[in-house]
Image: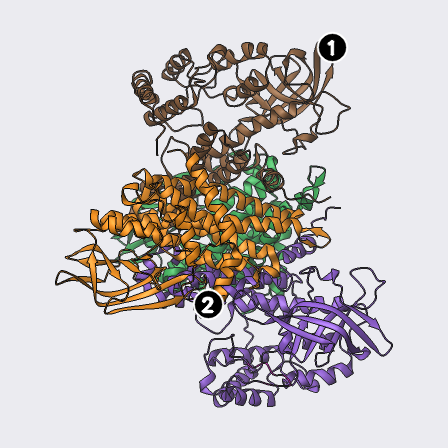
Chain colours: A purple, B brown, C orange, D green
Amino acid sequence: MATQAAPTLEDFRQEVRTWLEANCPASIRNKPRGMDTSFWGGRNPVYPSDDHKLWFERMAERAWTVPTWPAQYGGGGLDAAQGRVLKQEMARLGAPEPLSSLGIMMLGPALLKFGTEEQKLEHIPLIAQGKIRWAQGYSEPGAGSDLASLTTRGEDKGDHFLVNGQKIWTTYGHKADMIFTLVRTEPDAPKHQGISFLLIDMAQDGVNASPIRMISGNEHFSQTFFDDAVVPMANVVGERGKGWDVAKYLLTFERSMMGESIGGAAGKTLAESALEMLGKDGLAREPGLRGEVTEIMMETWGIQIASERLFDQGKAGQVSPFSPNVLKLLGTELATRRTRAMMSLGGFDNLAVDGRDAYEWLQAPPNCIAGGSNEVQMNVISKRALELPEHK
Amino acid sequence: MATQAAPTLEDFRQEVRTWLEANCPASIRNKPRGMDTSFWGGRNPVYPSDDHKLWFERMAERAWTVPTWPAQYGGGGLDAAQGRVLKQEMARLGAPEPLSSLGIMMLGPALLKFGTEEQKLEHIPLIAQGKIRWAQGYSEPGAGSDLASLTTRGEDKGDHFLVNGQKIWTTYGHKADMIFTLVRTEPDAPKHQGISFLLIDMAQDGVNASPIRMISGNEHFSQTFFDDAVVPMANVVGERGKGWDVAKYLLTFERSMMGESIGGAAGKTLAESALEMLGKDGLAREPGLRGEVTEIMMETWGIQIASERLFDQGKAGQVSPFSPNVLKLLGTELATRRTRAMMSLGGFDNLAVDGRDAYEWLQAPPNCIAGGSNEVQMNVISKRALELPEHK
Amino acid sequence: MALVLTQDETMLVDSARGLLDREAPVTAFRALRNSGEPLAWDRSLYARLADNGLVAPNVAEADGGVGMGIAAAGLVMEQAGHVLAAAPLLSAAISATLIAGAGSESQRADLLGPLVEGKRVIAPALDEAARHDPDRLDTRAEKAGEGWALTGDKTAVIDGFDADAWVVSAMADGAPALFLVEKGGSGLTVERFVAVDSRNYAKLAFSGTPAVRLGQGDAGAAIAAGLDVGRALLAAELLGAADEAFGRTVEYLKERKQFDRIIGTFQGLQHRAARLYSRLDLARGVVLKALRAIDEQDADATWLASLAKGTMTRLSRDVMMEAMQMHGGIGVTDDHDVGLYVKRAQAAGELLGDDHFHTERLAAGKWGL
Amino acid sequence: MALVLTQDETMLVDSARGLLDREAPVTAFRALRNSGEPLAWDRSLYARLADNGLVAPNVAEADGGVGMGIAAAGLVMEQAGHVLAAAPLLSAAISATLIAGAGSESQRADLLGPLVEGKRVIAPALDEAARHDPDRLDTRAEKAGEGWALTGDKTAVIDGFDADAWVVSAMADGAPALFLVEKGGSGLTVERFVAVDSRNYAKLAFSGTPAVRLGQGDAGAAIAAGLDVGRALLAAELLGAADEAFGRTVEYLKERKQFDRIIGTFQGLQHRAARLYSRLDLARGVVLKALRAIDEQDADATWLASLAKGTMTRLSRDVMMEAMQMHGGIGVTDDHDVGLYVKRAQAAGELLGDDHFHTERLAAGKWGL
């Protein structure tokens, strides 16, 4: 069977490897992800360290913050295979993402698909260069996974909407510059319609965000209040009243990401951690725990293979529309099991309130709820993939 | 804390032990239960062996076929504690049940609670002495666990009903003398009402039963066809149109039994079997299988304790009405896991089509469906124990 | 052994629940946590519990207790689990068992009375490994004049920070023994350990620390008894906590609307709830059986303690996961009580051996696998 | 390695499925079972499969095969799993791997052509323990004149009853070796083993049985390759069987009414079905990856074979349990096809190592746990 690796791709890999080794400062390689070690960009940027700043600036210069986005909007212009090589080589070196950003992960893809040429030219370069930090605002108190029932409303004032209402689970709402959000703009339309996808500048009096403290202690989410917030008509992405289409497209990204992230390249495997913490002899004395570690390793490998397959299917134009649902469901559940197994491995010591393992353990369950709860994923699979009937 | 063992009960235990040792033939002790080693009574009795016959006759003489039923109807007249002692001593000796009978397990309790004095005097002694073999006929093709929708009908002809219709999953229908069954006798009543609990003699032209072959190869069940079967009015148990109450009461017995039987006294434990089949060293080389055996042992112990607790609660008048549902749900599922683990322990050899382990493995899943499927048990618990609302 | 409560026990439960509901609701625990108070429990609440005979009710009447057995202590722990009551009840019952098992008559008289009265907090210090491993006992005791001197480290000391004294296991003359170490002893370092469940824990380091030996000879049996008691009581506490988290979740299912429906009407959630109900129903019997078996010195008592602890560790974990999932977003915020139950269940699950530990203990010890 | 099918593979799948649907529906397997025919497979069907290049498509073109690799053999097995086709495809592919791995050039030329053409059935005899244990190899080979003589016992010989020959592993000169034993050899006892899945199995006993050695030297690598192939192919067959049983169950959920409702509208069942769908979706990738890895001699190939076999053993078991449960009473009768899938899944699950075996193999071998 022929392999994918055409010679030119191998050349590219060598070039990337050399460049990364020369340009990624040693001090920031192979560091645990998450917590407060990422750079998030924005109008008031905060760099975790000078070396992070250097790394970000070098990568941003090549637009490798967004390596596969089109060059005409400030992207890196790589093809999918090259993008994958860059990712692999960064993982190999233990290089961190230069820029963590909901603009990259979510808004950008939506704009590229649904945005006007003006919107693309205005927003995408700012995302690529980390100039604007974006927040996501879909859910509302009382609505949860039931996005169709949201009530934040935008009143048509001719050249702008006046937005009033409240969002919850706004990712990084209190740290962001702008927010992409779902707002009911057509009050007379049926429930599942009449919602528009709006880009709202948060630097105005009508927008206020306050953080929500999670059980892990993190404050990545917030509640966001809109009180006569002004949103220019030009800030509607996609058609008016069809924001649902944009949001669904984005949720697909979010779900795949949440599921795949489980197999994440960086960091030690659970088996490696287990051996480090208890040793082979210690594990032999606890066959139940050892078995749990093994099963999680097996399932993790399965998720990694699924992610690899998704990529290959993408290239072949054979992607199943339900892969994101599957990955989200199984990936987030697996993460809760993996982080819990880490808790057991560490025993009493891992109960420390400021421990990294405890933090990750408490971070995992919210992912089974966010991005459409896992029950919603099962509903989607049941109704759309299996075409099981609904009870009238 | 005071224990239950009053001196008189201890005396009784000694007496029972001595009598059992003297009267239970050695050849039939400690034999595996089930398959074709039980005596089922009936008009044309078939004894597995002469010693079984002897054992049955001796036990029947003392009415210890039904040790705790009232003496005035031919029962043994023991109290609950004495009955338990007898059971324990029989288990200790490996003595088999002298008489396996749906009359004992199901119809008798229903008659004692709902029957008229005449019905009790007529039927209970015959059950105790194994003269009549009873079948159970509730389900119908197309109805399954949904008993309320059954369509077998009994036409009121003054002194008798004329019954027409079809039952399925009739336990031992093609081997039985009489059948207790649910028949719609009040055609104008709402669906959940209008059903009567009828005793039907199968020795008539209007009743025909043919066996159903199960995946295990057994033929314990049958389809039973009623074609103008004649049933005297005196054979209605409980009120006309209220057969549902009688059936529900019986299902409770059946469910507890199905669940509890998992912890059955006779036979080897799974751990003992595992050690016998693979040895300690063999198990050490297969920690996953060893772990599975351990977990099943733990859950089995839990079921045994639940059964013990149910008995104590019974004496104290504190039985939870949902214990039968819980035991049925968890007990039958555990049995499927236990019999499956036995299959793994035996590996290739246990694939033999005529093997005992394979037979039991294939016998287990039907119990998750029969007696109200496990989904029905969960519905009952959800709606009645937890009082979760129903969707309108 | 009857697996139903006696009248006395029912009264005890009612009294404990009444007191705890009034004086130790979850809001009290939350306030204590937010205060950052290092003791992590409330002295006045503990005094009230002692006044009502709820501290170590297993202590025999002859030793100054109410003599209601471990069953009573377990029932109190179950109620405490419901409200997450922060009080050193667990450490008191374990220490009392250790002292009663190993101590001389005069030591029992001196130590148990004040313990039961809530006047002195004595914490058990048995563990030395991050993952519970009772076979590991590296702490050494050596004769030092009239008494003994301890050297070694202890971890996972429940209620061990700012305790008045500790009952410490150590090797003496080649056998396990138990010692009493008083607060402020020389060569003693007490390090506070701040855990996810916001309870009181410590790590102890002894360096020639003066100690009084409890009784004489091999204290292995007393230590084993203390472990059995601790495991059964933790199982009881986990039962209470799981029961409460489950009950609150079921109530939430009856209130919360999504997709124009009360979410409790979704059969997917109903069946999951029914399974948890069923497992909790079984577990209730297992925990009571374990408690009774200890009181009746049943030959299986130590295995039943493992069965109870292993079962409840796993079940409470599953209940907590479902409690979070069914509460949705709100359930994973710090403002909501579910997280407090989740964290306590994790800590109580790991203490004195988690599900994996006890499963293996049964496999090897009880079933010879 | 691309985890999508090539055009050639897609055509192969279509051709296999078409042929099998036409000529080997489940009714054919049922009829064969009911007939009690000891061979337990259909010679004319096998000939048709061979005519279409579907028997051991992994055999290289140089050796007289179509040279499409194990991926192709796996895709055929998956289709065979859908209809429970009774044909010695698995044994052919394993034997071909053993012969190709250990045999001399002339042996490959002599043996593989007739095998691929379906003219000779050669069954692999590797196992000696009831529970798969490839480290156990007690069968001995000793020089006997020009050739060799075997002594020992083999079990779990797939398609081994009434085979034309067997490829047998045995210790020779202190190392594992492979031998060809012809039907009717002296000192050979072939015992038919009637299994729940109504397939062809045998136990073999050798007592100085004449045998021809395949190649020379240590055949350990060839045996390992044969095991990898067998495991990956069984995983593929289980995937097909599980997919089919699941698909039929989903269809049943859309038809069956209970409590005045189509049972597929019950969310409790919907969510369980959605979980199985998800696990099957993942497993499809795992199986394909294992097949490709063998063809590409990936360093992880042997571990991926275990991952695939372990995953599919467990998943197919869960699918079959749900298939029975969701079909209700009808699903556990002999007349219904579900039981046939249940039985085949159990047998294929145990052959060459079940989930427990492969989980342990990965734990110790791949991850060093």
Q: Is residue D133 visible?
A: no
For the stretch drawn in magenta, the main secondary structure is: loop
Residue, disc 2: C36
* Residue D235 place in picture, x, y as percent: 50, 54
Disc number for residue C193: none
Q: Which residues are magenta?
A: A39-45
Q: Residue drawn 51% across and 29% down? A: B218
Q: CA distance from mark 2 to mark 1?
A: 82 Å
Instruction: Report whether D263 appears left or right of A354.
Output: right
- Type of the residue with mark 2: Gly
Q: Position of residue D133 (x, y in %)?
A: 35, 52
The residue singled out by tag 1 in the image is B158
Please give the chain letter of the residue carrying mark 2.
C
Name the outermost residue toward the left: C145
Task: Choose top left, top right, bottom left or bottom right for residue A171.
Answer: bottom right
A140 vs B291, left or right, is right
Looking at the rendered structure, the number of numbered marks drawn on it comes to 2
